[in-house]
Amino acid sequence: MKIPDPYSYPERWAKFRMDEQFNYPHEVHIHGDVHIHYYKENPTHEHKRVHAQRKENQLHVHRNEHVPNSTQNTRGIDKRLKDSYKEIMLKSMSFKQDLYFITWTYAKKVWGRHYDEVEKDIGQIRKRIIHLFYQNFKDWKDNRPTKDFPRMWFVIEPHADGQYHIHLIMEPVDPDLLARGLHNQRFQLIWDRIVRQKICKRDTKDQQIITNKMLEKHPEYKYHHHSQKTFSQPNRYDHWLIARFICEYITHNNKRNGELWGLNRLTNSPNNINSKVMEREEEVINKIDYLNKDKNFKKHHLKHQAPSHLCFKYSDLSNNDNEP
């Protein structure tokens, strides 16, 4: 995959073709959180009706009408470069499907202090996600196993103390891809261990996903579709559950049981159950704006050739890679 040069402000990003993918359960958002409507039918038989219902019930702005919000206060900020970064990310995404948003932090303060170190860990995250479904795929650094495999975008962001953390925006796992995985003995072992024994196994059967502790920290969670639901209720095609599975998989490293699947250096926030699913275009655009903070484009910051917060090396920034 050819890595684009953000300083060239390429206009060719505007002409990328957006592939349509419909095979996923229907979700709607209230107050930015994911709410999932469950269907008893096979989801692959439901996707066309779901998409038609979406178009009827929701107002979607046309793709070409989306222009990233310009930086308002341009003093000391390279506005053109910032808008170019936002454009590069948005033009490589399709709004015809949902997007996962997952965050990992480092388990110890001494880890994640150097950019090259974090970039290397991102490579391992990408490799592990791809090998979860295509174990023998060797060209994972630059390509995806198939043109329909979920694209990934990585962002490296520092805390106030200088330690980095990692954000992943990822296209959804298609039900057909998940079903393919569940027919694989290794994948099913990982799924059962993480989903059934780690995420969904609780002290009591009636333990709710959205706890009072979470509501105290995030009052908007009272509108979450999983509010007042237990961990036994989401089905395997639940996008929140799949996003949470990927999040936990990357941090799962149990030497005692020989389950060295993830990176022991990384951790997440299981108390907040904070893996998110973004469905609305507005939410995605706002998140891209949030990730491209002004501080990353201060002219004195760029003058010292600070590394890019967008991980070009392992992000899928083109819509035409893996084309036959």
Image: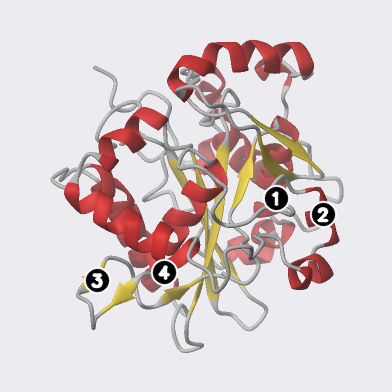
Crowd rating for badge 4 (residues with CA inside 10 Å; few <14, some 14–19, many 20+): many
Of marks 1 and 4, the one in the foreground: 4
Q: Residue at x 22, y 39 (%)?
A: 183
Which residue bears the numbered disc 3? 260
Of marks 1 and 3, the one in the foreground: 3
Q: Residue at x 50, y 42 (%)?
A: 235
Of marks 4 and 3, the one in the foreground: 3
Which residue bears the numbered disc 2? 222
Q: Residue furthest front?
A: 205
Of marks 1 and 2, the one in the foreground: 2
In the drawing, does residue 275 fall left or right of residue 28? left
Query: Along the polypeptide, which appears first: circle 1 or circle 4?
Result: 1
Out of 127 and 27, give the one closest to the viewer. Answer: 27
Which residue bears the numbered disc 1? 78
The quarter of the rendered structure image containing the C terminus is top left
Which residue bears the numbered disc 4? 118
Instruction: Tell whether label 3 touches label 4 (CB within 8 Å).
Output: no
Q: Residue at x 37, y 23 (%)?
A: 320
